[in-house]
Structures are given as C-alpha cells and as structure tokens.
Amino acid sequence: MKPKTLQTILGHSSIGITMNLYVHTTEEQKHKEIDLVADALKVI
C-alpha cells in the first residue's frame, strides 16, 4: 500500500508518523537497492 494512502486510512496527521511506524527495510532490501543504483550508474 502506498504510504500516503495508509496515512489517510489510519488518520495520521503527517506522513512522518506513518513512515516511522509502518515503513521498515531489511538488509536484503538495502543491498538490492544499492545494486540497482550501481547498475544504473554503471559503477562496479
């Protein structure tokens, strides 16, 4: 679900509250994103 939609459903006054409470990342996700950026920049 998009964070802004979740904010509206839950009635949070700011997106920051929603992001801090419900959006998390894992080490695996971080590595995948870093790989995507490296591929896009052709850095390796």
Image (spheres, rainbow, N blue to C red):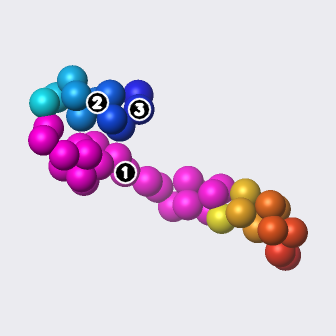
Amino acid type at image mark 2: Leu
Q: Is residue 41 above or below residue 23?
A: below
> Residue at point 43% right, 53% down?
25
Q: CA distance from mark 3 to mark 1?
A: 13 Å
Is tag 3's residue or tag 1's residue first in the polypeptide sequence?
A: 3
Q: Is residue 1 above or below residue 44?
A: above
Q: Is residue 35 visible?
A: no
Label 1: which secondary element: loop
- Residues rendered magenta in the picture: 12-33
Q: Which mark is residue 24?
A: 1
Question: Would you name the residue on which mark 3 appears?
Answer: 2
Asked whether 11 or 34 is in front, the reply is 11
Residue type at mark 3? Lys
Helix, strand or loop at label 3? It is loop
In terms of depth relative to the viewer, which is nearer, 16 or 32? 16
Q: Please provide percent x and percent y for residue 40.
A: 80, 61
- Rendered residue at 81%/62% (across/down): 39
Where's the C terminus, which quadrant? bottom right
| Cβ–Cβ under 8 Å for marks 2 and 3 | yes
Residue highlighted by disc 2: 6
